[in-house]
Image (spheres, rainbow, N blue to C red):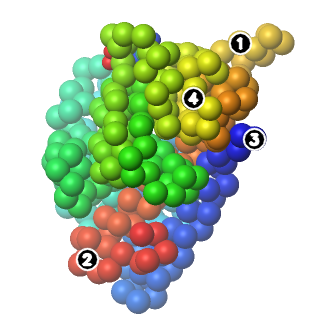
Amino acid sequence: MSTVIDGKAFAAGLRERVAQAVKIIGSQNGIKPGLAVVLAGEDPASQVYVRNKGKQTAEVGMNSFEHKLPMDTSERELLALVARLNNDAAVNGILVQLPLPTHIDESKVINSIRVDKDVDGFHVENVGKLFIGEDSLVPCTPAGCLMLLKDHIGDLTGKNAVIVGRSNIVGKPVSVLLLREHCTVTIAHSRTRDLPAVCRQADIVVAAVGVPELVKGDWIKSGAVVIDVGISRVKGKDGKSKLVGDVDYAAAMEVADGVTPVPGGVGPMTIACLLRNAVIATCRQHGIEIPSVIT
Ligand code: NDP
């Protein structure tokens, strides 16, 4: 019998624990964490994300600072805003919503964020620290995938993990996190030969591709655990648009031990992990212990 890995419920629990951590820091140290989110342009999906982030930041008791900039904002203006936020003691975490307008160099902006305020974990120094196993701010979606896997499986040591997708924001960091948990990791991508056969070897499949229902039921080994990161909007049989993942969910549920649904799986974990990162960043900046409720 397959289990639905309920990311929505896990994320709600994590947000509660983050709220407790915020209370502890407030009462013991008189500090209220602050998270700044910067949005440049009018991408509709980004606007929804930013609104949700702001709402959930306030709900866990943190200060939320939103900076909405017009599409024609110059790179210089954006870098100047990041520099101001870097120096603002009330701001402990900075997130610049991607994608940025095409005339702005994304990596230049991301790498201008103070490393200890980079709550997305995309700064090259945080990426490097993650790779060599030093304390860093870990990218949110990969961190969420790992939490769901550990919650469902427990010890991951020795598991064969196949990660489909090698992006810098999901595939690669998930692979490093699973390697750190002593999995044997295979990273697959668009040039991988015989992807179905590669997936069939896996105790754990993480699909982060962006191709609707690419991973079929007969690619999944009996008893494997499947984490579906993909989110695509497609037209259903009834003609209405719906969200689907990178995995054929119904077919995977027939064979797997557990599968994350889309929506309601990895998606809600991303913001919850962002809020957790903001608390971790605050503690490190002030040299105080990270409350054990979120460690
Ligand atoms: P990218 O487009 O950056 O990367 C996609 C990866 O998939 C690439 O490595 C690509 O290979 C690989 N790929 C593409 N087609 C195939 C194929 N047919 N077979 C095997 N591999 C393939 O995507 P992201 O990593 O940014 O995102 C992936 C998905 O996850 C998207 O649906 C996105 O919306 C979702 N997402 C969800 C989040 C959440 O919060 N739940 C957060 C971030 C992303 P190659 O490198 O060879 O081109």
Q: Residue beneath label 3, please?
A: 1
- Check disc 4 and report its element: helix, strand or loop: loop
The numbered dot on residue 221 is 4
Q: First in sequence: mark 3 or mark 1?
A: 3
Q: CA distance from mark 3 to mark 1?
A: 29 Å
- Check disc 1 and report its element: helix, strand or loop: strand
Q: x and y percent of residue 45 in the render?
A: 53, 30
Q: Residue beneath label 1, please?
A: 235
- Mark 1 vs mark 4: give the one in front: 4
Q: CA distance from mark 2 to mark 1?
A: 49 Å
- Check disc 3 and report its element: helix, strand or loop: loop
Q: x and y percent of residue 176 in the render?
A: 29, 43
- Mark 2 vs mark 1: give the one in front: 1
- Residue type, numbered disc 2: His
The numbered dot on residue 287 is none
Looking at the image, which residue is at 58% across and 46% down?
Answer: 268
Q: Quadrant of residue 175?
A: top left
- Residue type, numbered disc 3: Met
Q: First in sequence: mark 4 or mark 2?
A: 4
Taking the image as shown, residue 126 lies to the left or right of residue 270, namely: left
Q: Nearer the viewer, residue 234 or 133?
A: 133
- Mark 3 vs mark 2: give the one in front: 3
Q: x and y percent of residue 20 in the render?
A: 54, 76
Q: First in sequence: mark 3 or mark 2?
A: 3
